[in-house]
Amino acid sequence: MIARPKVWVTELAGRFWAEVGAPPPFPRDLRAVLCWSQGLHVAEVPNLTLATAAEHFARHGVPCPAPAENRPLAGCFGGHLGVGVILFDPTLTPAEVRFTLAHEVAHFLRDYQAPRRKVEARLGSRALEVLDGQRPPTVNERFAGVLRGVAIGCHTHFLDRDRRGRALTDEAREAEEAADRLAFELLAPFDAANPGASSDRAALVLRLTSDFGLPPAEAAKYAAVLVR
């Protein structure tokens, strides 16, 4: 069975390309278009770790406590006061850099930007002060419903993990899986990947790595999502 992407995946991917311009050719390097994304800063940090990420976030105005333990990171995302910051390790392989960057962009789009847009559309721009932790919500804002489940204050998508980098909570695992799914759509959209062209999953994995530049492990995961 071929599984099409959920509506939120195609909507967020479509909005992203509408804002930054025409998608680059495959295999896509999002660095070529992210300069056009409003409110998002991207920085290369060789040999990125929890400690260096915390330092760089602080420099960009994203409050982040110093980690109790240090470990390597491929990439991470932080957001504060409407500004998103993506850090990634450029010493990874080109395929790993490509997917890491798309994964962190997906966190920005789904977990940070989309909730802010929803709250602003429903309650007005002043309600963003609540999301930024600048004031508590009013009675009317609490009963509006759109604040339910929305994180308040600074966002950092790399803290809820153990020393091996595994997500610790169900919420964190859901966020990571969703970011992967949106990253797949940004780099190898469903229509271009055309999973129905062959019933051979191995052939699909090969095409995802060779034509779209996905790392082998992520290509296998995407193929499993598409062909069940």
Image (cartoon, rainbow, N blue to C red):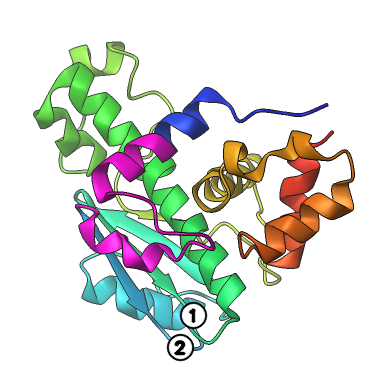
Label 1 belongs to which residue? 89
- Where disc 2 sits, the SS reads loop
Residue visible at 69% across and 65% down?
Answer: 210
Asked if the magenta segment contains residue 115, the reply would be no
For label 2, the crowd category at 10 Å Cα-Cα, with few meaning under 14, some 14 to 19 and many 20 or more, is some
The residue under label 1 is which amino acid type?
Answer: Asp
Asked if the magenta segment contains residue 27, the reply would be yes
Residue visible at 78% across and 55% down?
Answer: 205
Residue visible at 51% across and 88% down?
Answer: 47
Specify start and end residues of the magenta stretch as a single range.
13-38
CB under 8 Å between callouts 1 and 2?
A: yes
Residue visible at 39% across and 36% down?
Answer: 14
Whether residue 52 is visible: yes
Residue 35 % position (x, y): 24, 63
Label 2 belongs to which residue? 46
In this orientation, which residue lies closer to the viewer: 86 or 161?
86
The residue under label 2 is which amino acid type?
Answer: Pro
Whether residue 64 is visible: no
Lower sequence index among marks 1 and 2: 2
